Image (cartoon, helix red, strand yellow):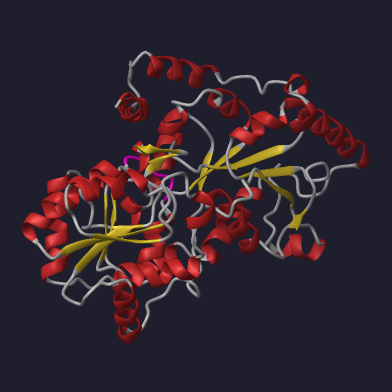
Amino acid sequence: MRVLPPDHPTTRLLGLKPHVHFFGGQGIGWALDEDLRCAREAVSGAVVEGSFARSPIIHSAWWPPLLQAGAAALQGKSVVCFADNPPAFYLTRPGFEQAAARVDLWIARSQEAVSQFQELGLPVALAPYTVDPEVFHPLPPAERQKIRAGLGLSECDFVVGNFHRDSLEKNVKLPKAQKGPDIFLEVVIEARKLHPTLKVLLAGPRRHWLRRELEKRNIPFVFSGTVLAEDDFSVNVLPREKLNRLYSALDCVVISSRWEGGPYSVLEALLAGRPVISTRVGMAADLLEGWIFSSPAEGAKLLAHVASVPPDFSALRDRALGSHSAAELRRALLEAYSGFPQTRESAIRAGRALFLRGLSRVHVNFRKPLGGQSRIAGIMENVRGQKSGREEVARRAIEIAGAEAAVKSS
């Protein structure tokens, strides 16, 4: 029998609220932690946020921590999991077949991810990413000019950029295939042929690869951060208020990713009032109709158009404010939780979960595997053998695996 939603009048009358434990963040203030923070804020007051042991609903930021918890600790619990990447990417990662067997509901963040989960036959609901419009918002023209001047940029410069990581984890000599810094580089090279005043603004950690490649090609750029030869993650992660100011300095944001769960930068840029162009990934495909490119040449033409006739993105901004609001996230999450038990675990079940969760943390040998979803395991085996079969999602997975392999062999 389906449980009444938390916002249903009868549920409110009875005082029932779902008991949820938010789980699986990284503790570094990056995207996964932001996912959980936004979720908590969105459902505040409508759920009871509890411990792992006492909560019947476990909401994980992503699936790898579920494997670390183990099947015994999760026994009897309902597992909801954010999809931080499209399922095509997960098919290239060992262990996804276990997560697929255990997650009761995947929370996709784009129509692309929803379609891929459906093709795999996995339960899925759509819940939007959100960013705070009090943090990301347009700045007055005078303030924008002041910020640009402080960065050494003139009003005649056509400034493009993004604030993604473009180096591969701690190996700052290699590019991160997902973010497509090589695609960004080719777009910029082509765009400068059409608009020679183009300059690049970069910020954030692990921008080493792109900075080095821009220097090689004598493409002018500004890096807003501390330049270190080694990994700079600990010093160049920027507060979101500063990111908003840097967005205001851009004439256009360029997203060049090969695959994405979001990215957040689509919403950040739109809410900051900046034009955005993107490859067809994640929620960019949902929000940026008319501003999607499939090749560097197409991206360069879009940039040339932005440079010659600055477009009005206010309608797209308004659409993003509506479809990706905290209210929409709240509605979607409460509906997702409504299919699961609402009351907290009994003392006996909570004690068992606490004991088994503790054992799983002591040593991997105490973690019981989550099992495996046979169909997903078969598709993953085909992907490893570069056999796409009938699934479009498998074809995309093979493309992703190929892109990552090309980077590592370069």
* Nearer to the camera, 226 or 104: 226
Q: Main secondary structure of the magenta part?
A: loop
Q: Is residue 265 left or right of residue 32?
A: left
Could you tell me if residue 118 is visible in this image?
A: no
On whether residue 86 falls in the magenta region, the answer is no
Check the image and report above or below for 280 versus 323: above
Check the image and report above or below for 156 versus 231: below
**Magenta part of the protein: which range?**
258-262
The residue sitting at 64% across, 19% down in the picture is 371
Q: x%, y% of residue 34?
A: 56, 56
Quick one: which residue is furthest to the right in this view?
348
Q: x%, y% of residue 12?
A: 75, 64
The residue sitting at 71% across, 41% down in the picture is 1
Quick one: which residue is furthest to the left in this view?
194
Quarter of the rendering containing residue 307:
bottom left
Check the image and report above or below for 3 versus 90: below
* Nearer to the camera, 238 or 391: 238
Quick one: which residue is furthest to the bottom in this view?
142
Q: Quadrant of the C terminus?
A: top left
Could you tell me if residue 243 is visible in this image?
A: yes
Q: x%, y% of residue 230?
A: 45, 44
The residue sitting at 33% across, 45% down in the picture is 281
Looking at the image, how many numbered discs can be counted on the residues?
0
Quick one: which residue is furthest to the front in this view?
229
The residue sitting at 37% across, 68% down in the picture is 246
Q: Is residue 40 left or right of residue 323?
A: right
* Nearer to the camera, 297 or 112: 297
Q: x%, y% of residue 289?
A: 25, 57
Q: Is residue 233 left or right of residue 223?
A: right
